[in-house]
Amino acid sequence: MPAYTKINAKFTSKSEKITEEIVINRAIVGGWTGRDKDALQHHIDELAKIGVKAPEKTPMFYRVGVSRLTTADAIEVIGDGSSGEVEYVLIQRENRIWVGAASDHTDRVYEHMGITVAKQLCDKPIATEFWPLDEVEGHWDQIKIRSYIQEGGEEVLYQDGNVACLLSPQELLAHLREEGDNLGEGDLLFGGTCGAIGDVRYSPAFRMELIDPVLKREIHHSYAVIPVPIRG
């Protein structure tokens, strides 16, 4: 029996809002998806500072267990060596592609041992609202992604960019097809992230936003990060 995860999600279009329980069958994480080669190299360089090897090619696609997806407002992690990354995500539902937001929370301590391992070690918080891709494609590059972390008891801006810095959904899906794969019904695909402001670092809280300034819609999600003790 294949693995799956169920979530309650809201699908918001110009004409209606539908809330329903959906089944997610696969979680695919797109990595190194920067459209701007300079910005992509910046992200590669910032991860190299913590021992992560440069990818063999770009983009790369990593599989994580679908059970790692969560809509909870808190996740547990190993110690204080992980960090979040705001990303746009795509999901196939009833032969239509929808856009949402998620955090590719990753264990940075283990990342130099293998990116797949580091990604699998952490839950992946996802927002519960999605928009139809066909409603935003005409102004896609204007959509903003942001994240915030907590430092010294204050919320600070951690990532701030436009999805224009990343491969577009159609470009990303084309690369996926080149690898002999496709976005099937119930599949969730992470679209990549922009660089952090300052170093990649741990925070006890993470908040993310996907902002459409044209249709004046926003998707939000926040979660606490709770370390479990390392005893050996």
Image (cartoon, rainbow, N blue to C red):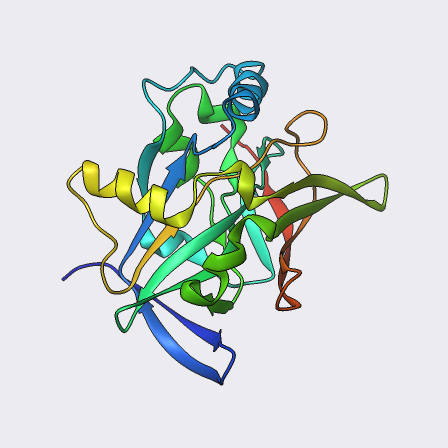
x and y percent of residue 115 in the render? Answer: 39, 28
Q: Residue at x 45, y 19 (%)?
A: 112
In the displayed structure, does residue 149 sit left or right of residue 209? right
In the displayed structure, does residue 55 sit left or right of residue 148? left
| Residue 230 picture quarter | top right
In depth, the one of 116 and 176 nearer the eye is 176
Q: Residue at x 31, y 36 (%)?
A: 61
In the displayed structure, does residue 192 sit left or right of residue 120? right
x and y percent of residue 8 in the render? Answer: 45, 75
x and y percent of residue 24 in the render? Answer: 32, 63
Q: Residue furthest front?
A: 138
Q: Is residue 88 visible?
A: yes
Q: Residue at x 53, y 15 (%)?
A: 48
Position of 32 relative to 169 (above/below): above
x and y percent of residue 66 in the render? Answer: 33, 54
Q: Residue at x 46, y 73 (%)?
A: 9
Position of 221 relative to 113 (above/below): below
Q: Which image quarter holds the N terminus?
A: bottom left
In depth, the one of 85 and 170 nearer the eye is 170
Q: Is residue 190 visible?
A: no
Number of marks present in the image shown: 0
